[in-house]
Image (cartoon, rainbow, N blue to C red):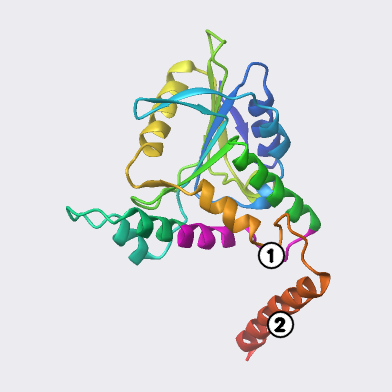
Amino acid sequence: MARIYDNLETKFTDGLQGIISNVGVKRVDFCVGYFNLRGWNLIVNEVDQLSGDFVYEQNYRIFRTCRLLIGMHRPDEDLVRSLYSGKKQLPDAEYVQKCKIAIARDFKKQLLLGLPSKNDEWTLRRLSAQMKEEKVCVRLYLREPLHAKLYLAYRPDDNFNPIQAIMGSSNLTYSGLTRQGELNAEFADSDSAEKLSEWFDARWNDKFCIDITKELIDAIDNSWAGEEDIPPYYIYLKTVYHTSVRDNELYLKAL
């Protein structure tokens, strides 16, 4: 029987933390529509404890710990058309890199919902470190909007249940993991979990799926959460600016 997580009687946070930290789990795959720091903060320690394992990606054997696939971030359509125009002549490497940097900077905005707190800063630095350590790899699925939510945990030494799977409605956000009325089910049978794993791999390896890990590291390290110390006065000015912009928008809406 499937275990249900609805954030009412049973919190999805407990279920997700549980399958990540379960005995024998070496790596995880997540496919979500949306993702933000306050959601990542709830599992950042569990991901740190994973040892990682090898996985085949397009016939290449690659060591992975956490593969994170984001499906509902829609970057500027002109950038996507430029990368996947269907023309015989492919865009050169320099142009592809410029597009990926622009997409990563835009995606970073999704991470930083609300005014940044000290905890957000710590989580953002931790995420950057995890990507630098190659514990986390982030890709955006651009073929079409992908609203699926799938969480897979792999324990290869378990002959009876090598893959644990949770599928449902929760995004990897704080609200999705703790607050909103959600419905997620944990699948116990190995056949269903294997099929879900194959579904994930097909989208992870799709040509319309781009790896923005390196670009996201650069975007984070060049933000307020970078390792280089920023004078408090500049942080104050930035906070005042964003607060005034928000207040002006609220004032105009009230007119």
Above or below residue 201? Residue 22 is above
Report the front residue among 139 and 255.
Answer: 139
* Magenta span dominant secondary structure: helix
Q: Name the residue under label 2.
A: 244
Dot 1: what SS? loop
Dot 2: what SS? helix
Extreme-right residue of the structure? 232
Residue 55 horizontal/vertical position (percent)? 46, 24
Q: Name the residue under label 1.
A: 114
Q: What stretch is highlighted in magenta?
A: 101-117
At label 1, the amino acid type is: Gly
Report the front residue among 69 and 211.
Answer: 211
Above or below residue 131? Residue 23 is above
Extreme-left residue of the structure? 88
Which quarter of the image is occupied by the C terminus?
bottom right
Above or below residue 214? Residue 204 is above
